[in-house]
Image (cartoon, rainbow, N blue to C red):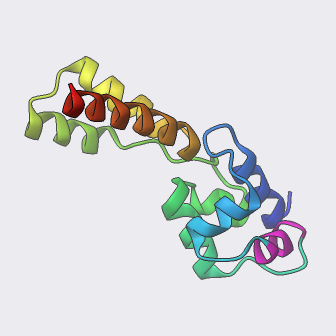
Amino acid sequence: MTQGERVRMIRKHPNVNLTLEKFGEKLGIKKSALSLIENGKNNLTEQMAKSICREFRVNYFWLTGEKGEPFINIPDTALDDLADDYDLDNIDKKIIQKYLELSADQRDVIKAYLRSLCEDEKSG
């Protein structure tokens, strides 16, 4: 699998599931530039690879050389640190973990719903 094919796989993965345009926006590039990378017409630059890894929690070694798993899990220690700092129980931790595993579009739906609840409280 080429690097471009791996980029496409990440973009279409259920945890990400973004259009060329939305994926490109998150990386600061146009959909045409992203399409050229996915189709192997342009190489994946080091800077772009690092941006994809940072933005979408992708394993750099998998993206650049297909070694390991595509995605990096949320480090338990970071979640444990949050739990300690904010007195979170196991349910709180599970909610945060599951939320972070959602695609950007799925998180947007949840945020819109929560925003509407807050607005209802203001008017009521």
Residue 30 sits inside the magenta stretch = no
The overriding secondary structure of the stretch rendered in magenta is helix
Residue 42 point in image, percent of width and height: 84, 81
- The quarter of the picture where residue 21 lies is bottom right
Q: Is residue 65 above or below residue 99?
A: below
Q: With 33 as the anchor, is 114 left or right in this view?
A: left
- Residues 124 and 1: in front is 124
- What range is drawn magenta here? 32-39
Q: Quadrant of residue 86?
A: top left
Horizontally, residue 114 falls left or right of residue 6, namely left
Q: Residue furthest front?
A: 123
Horizontal and vertical percent position of residue 6:
77, 57
Query: Is 100 on the left-hand or right-hand side of 35?
Result: left
Farthest-out residue, top? 91
Q: Residue at x 68, y 51 (%)?
A: 18
Instruction: Pinpoint residue 92: horizontal percent, then vertical percent.
Output: 25, 24
Measured as percent of width and height from the top left, residue 16 is found at 62, 46
Does 8 sit above or below residue 48? Answer: above
Which part of the image, by quadrant, shows the N terminus? Answer: bottom right
